[in-house]
Amino acid sequence: MTNEGRAPQITTQASAGLFLAGRVLAALAFMSMALGQIIHYEDACSAAKNLGMPLAHAYVALSILLQFSGSVLLALGLRARIGVSLLIASLLPALWLFMDPLSNRVYLSGAIAALGGLLPYLALGPGPWSMDNLYHTLSKER
């Protein structure tokens, strides 16, 4: 029996712990971005406007909402794929704004790295130490 077409199982406790640590660290990175935008809201709006973002205030507010809610879902492992999708959605405008790699290489590289770090959670799910897994385990026992 092959495992073709299915996500590999995370079987060891060490692997489960590393998957949890990666989820929490990724969530903390996005949460810190959201908090930075809240604390420096006007500066974030000015920066977005200077980069050519239409409706900069709405963009920054939506970005905060996506990053905050996606971070919480990812950290808890509760509907983590939805959380990751929200975080990816918050990255897409940044990727579009920083498409000129000659002038914004650092920002573009950071956004691409963050996107790459989120994709395994989108593909594999939150891992065994998550609220989703706990829910599925408890529902099977009934």
Image (cartoon, rainbow, N blue to C red):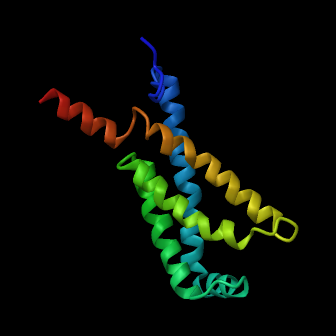
Q: Is residue 75 above or below residue 104?
A: above
- Extreme residue toward the right, this view: 102
Residue 141 x %, y %: 16, 27
Q: Is residue 48 left or right of residue 75?
A: right
Position of the C terminus by quadrant: top left
- Counting from the top left corner in percent of width and height, residue 33 is at 59, 66
**Front-lying residue, 52 or 80:** 52
Q: For the point 50% across and 65% down, which residue is it?
A: 67
Above/below status of 42 relative to 114: below
Which picture quadrant has residue 92? bottom right
Residue placed furthest toward the top: 1
Q: Is residue 34 above or below residue 24?
A: below
Q: Residue at x 69, y 83 (%)?
A: 47
What percent of the width, then of the height, locates residue 80? 41, 48
Counting labels gives 0
Left or right relative to 141: residue 18? right
**Which quadrant: the N terminus?**
top left
Q: Relative to 108, is 41 on the left or the right?
A: left
Percent x, y for residue 54?
61, 87
Q: In front: 137, or 41?
A: 137
Residue at figure coordinates x 70%, y 73% from the top left: 97
